[in-house]
Image (tube, helix red, strand yellow):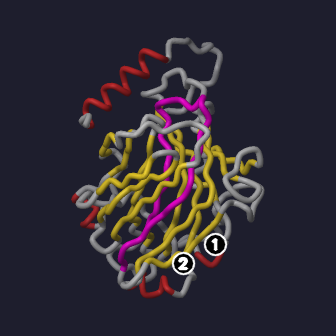
Amino acid sequence: MRTARNISLLLLLWACETDTGTRDTDEAPLLETITSASVIFAHSNTVLTSFFQAPSLAYISGYFYFEDTLAEDVIFGFDIEHFEGVDNPLRFKGADWMALAGFNRGGILWFPIGSPENLEGIPTPTDRWEIRDFEVELQPLTWYKMTITCDFNSLQFISVSLQGGDIDKTLSLSGFPLEYPNYAAFDKPTLTGYTFALRGLEFSPENTPGFDVYFDDIEMGIYTGTEFVRIMEDGFENQSTVGDIPISTVPIPLSDIDENLWYLENEAAKLEIVTTIKRSGTVSLKCSADLEQ
């Protein structure tokens, strides 16, 4: 298995060797990074009342798809987060516990981990990345199901699994801490689920084409003590566009947020509901990691 340092070096060398073109000096500068991410909220399901008082295991699961033109350096996947809220937090006011993981098309898994400061209630930048070779080669034009499982009690990852094509594999991530990356100014606790495609200028100085990853049929669930219970299931069929999170005041009232809609996770995200590619239903979500401004 390749080490994290070796994989990072290989990716950097790959970027330098393959992005050999030059950009027109009159073009707008590229973004340093882009995280094209969507977010959905889940907080009103009755089983979540007990969960927010005593968090346990949780998961996010969904399908991704890419075409044969996807660039090697684009990282894509899912994320599930527990916002504690500001009114009556379990641990820290506004804490946000994140279990994010993503692949590139070569089967390399990336996931950020927490710092000791997080357990003291201090958010930290997402810069402590673990990298693992999943020892699979993802194929284009194939729907893969990815599942991230974590423990919001011990604040640790549990596992990442991948099924699709001829792949059926689970990698234990037990012991790796979850990160607290942001102060999340929502009034009440909520679970949030995400799809994302990201890219950094460091690995693609010429923004090599091949930006798009498609997502469909996403679900989240929690462990109730005897079984996992699904708390959200969605295939982007309830909307034609992805808009901003409605913010009327701070703290942000969860009552203002529609739990049946996906929102832009950040203002730079490039998201589109499309009908041309879908796993089920009539649409899927395209996340574009294009660094153009």
User: Alpha-carbon neighbours of circle 2 within 10 Å: few (<14), some, or many (≥20)?
Assistant: some
Q: Residue 236 sits in which quadrant?
A: bottom right
Residue drawn at x 48%, y 25% is: 204
Magenta includes 78? yes
Q: Position of residue 117 (x, y in %)?
A: 24, 59
Task: Please state which amino acid type lies under the numbered disc 2.
Answer: His
Q: Distance between the residues labelled 1 and 2?
A: 8 Å
Element type where label 1 sits in the image: loop
> Would residue 64 appear left or right of 99 to someone viewing this image?
right
Task: Check the image and report above or below for 248 versus 242.
Answer: below
Magenta includes 97? no
Residue drawn at x 60%, y 29% is: 69
Q: Where is residue 230 in the image (x, y as percent from the top left)?
A: 52, 75
User: Alpha-carbon neighbours of circle 1 within 10 Å: few (<14), some, or many (≥20)?
Assistant: some
Element type where label 2 sits in the image: loop
Residue drawn at x 40%, y 21% is: 14
Which one is nearer the viewer's eye here, 204 or 245?
204
Residue 268 in sight from this viewpoint? no
Q: Where is residue 226 in the image (x, y as percent from the top left)?
A: 38, 85
Going from N to C along the chain, the mark reached first, 1 or 2, is 2
Magenta part of the protein: which range? 55-81
Q: Is there a contact, CB below 8 Å, between mark 1 and mark 2? A: yes
Q: In which quarter of the image is the C terminus?
A: top right
Residue drawn at x 47%, y 17% is: 18
Which one is nearer the viewer's eye here, 94 or 171?
171
Pointer 1 residue: 259
Q: In which quarter of the image is the N terminus?
A: top left
Pointer 2 residue: 43
Task: Please state which amino acid type lies under the numbered disc 1.
Answer: Glu
